[in-house]
Image: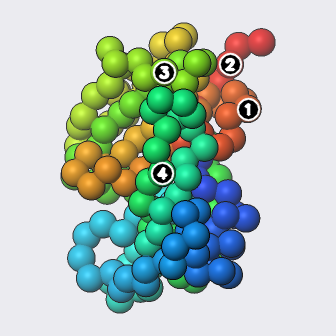
């Protein structure tokens, strides 16, 4: 598989959400108690545990910009959690999802429609690899296909796109 890293939200953003109780739209965060499946934290990229408090709010995705930009609802642990930092590991929030959407974008942040795909979370690796291995791909966003929540972003390792969702390394 192509080298990559899944990119969580910045710790400063998680801390701001928790400290202010407001999301990127300036609206109050919703406190939800995990009472079933779902509740993917966009900072540690782990699912919330039953009975755990989670925050739900609107997050301004850093990428893509332009015509594909949109704010997105995200969950965040109400408690402090460690930021996901693993390399070449698909985020647990992706693997645990019943169905995810893989969306690749080029350097102009335009969607590469021919690389888009939907799969069960545990089966996403070949689709992610196909998108990351394509030389046109700058980054890949992975969303829960049913709810549209961003589950993870991937960027090429060493690609410098630290605020995208999934990345792959660039050749020098």
Mark 3: give few (<14), some (14-19) or many (20+) Cα within 10 Å.
some
Mark 1: give few (<14), some (14-19) or many (20+) Cα within 10 Å.
some
Assign a secondary structure to mark 4. strand
35 over 161 or under it: above or below: below
Is the Cβ of the residue at disc 2 closer than 8 Å to that at disc 1? Answer: yes
N-terminal label among 3 and 4: 4
Query: Alpha carbon of mark 2 to alpha carbon of mark 1: how far?
Result: 9 Å
Q: Which quadrant is the C terminus positioned in?
A: top right
Q: Which residue is denoted by mark 3 in the rendering?
A: 110
Closer mark to the observer between disc 2 and disc 3: 3
Mark 4: give few (<14), some (14-19) or many (20+) Cα within 10 Å.
few
Q: Which residue is denoted by mark 2 in the rendering?
A: 170
N-terminal label among 4 and 2: 4
Closer mark to the observer between disc 2 and disc 1: 1
Toward which corner of the image does residue 111 lie, by quadrant? top left
Q: Residue at x 68, y 73 (%)?
A: 15
Mark identifier at residue 129: none
Is the Cβ of the residue at disc 3 closer than 8 Å to that at disc 4? Answer: no
Assign a secondary structure to mark 1. loop
Q: Which residue is denoted by mark 4 in the rendering?
A: 71
Closer mark to the observer between disc 1 and disc 4: 4
Query: Alpha carbon of mark 2 to alpha carbon of mark 3: how far?
Result: 19 Å
Q: Nearer the viewer, residue 55 or 36?
A: 55
Assign a secondary structure to mark 2. loop
Q: Which residue is denoted by mark 1 in the rendering?
A: 160
Assign a secondary structure to mark 3. loop
Question: How far across and down, in percent of the image, does residue 134 sit?
Answer: 48, 13
Question: How far across and down, in percent of the image, does residue 35 sit?
Answer: 26, 82
Query: Alpha carbon of mark 3 to alpha carbon of mark 4: how far?
Result: 17 Å
Q: Nearer the viewer, residue 106 or 157?
A: 106
């Amino acid at each position: 598989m192509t080298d990559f890293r899944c990119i969580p939200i910045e710790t400063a953003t998680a801390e701001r959400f928790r400290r202010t109780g407001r999301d990127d739209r300036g609206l109050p965060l919703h406190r939800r108690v995990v009472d079933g499946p779902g509740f993917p934290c966009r900072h540690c990229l782990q699912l919330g545990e039953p009975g755990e408090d989670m925050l739900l709010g609107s997050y301004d995705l850093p990428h893509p910009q332009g015509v594909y930009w949109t704010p997105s609802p995200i969950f965040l642990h109400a408690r402090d959690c460690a930021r996901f930092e693993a390399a070449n590991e698909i985020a647990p929030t992706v693997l645990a999802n019943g169905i995810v959407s893989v969306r690749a974008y080029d350097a102009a942040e335009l969607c590469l429609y021919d690389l888009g795909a939907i799969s069960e979370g545990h089966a996403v690796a070949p689709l992610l690899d196909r998108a990351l291995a394509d030389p046109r791909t700058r980054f890949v966003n992975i969303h829960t296909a049913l709810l549209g929540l961003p589950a993870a972003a991937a960027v090429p390792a060493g690609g410098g796109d630290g605020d995208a969702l999934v990345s792959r390394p660039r050749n020098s």
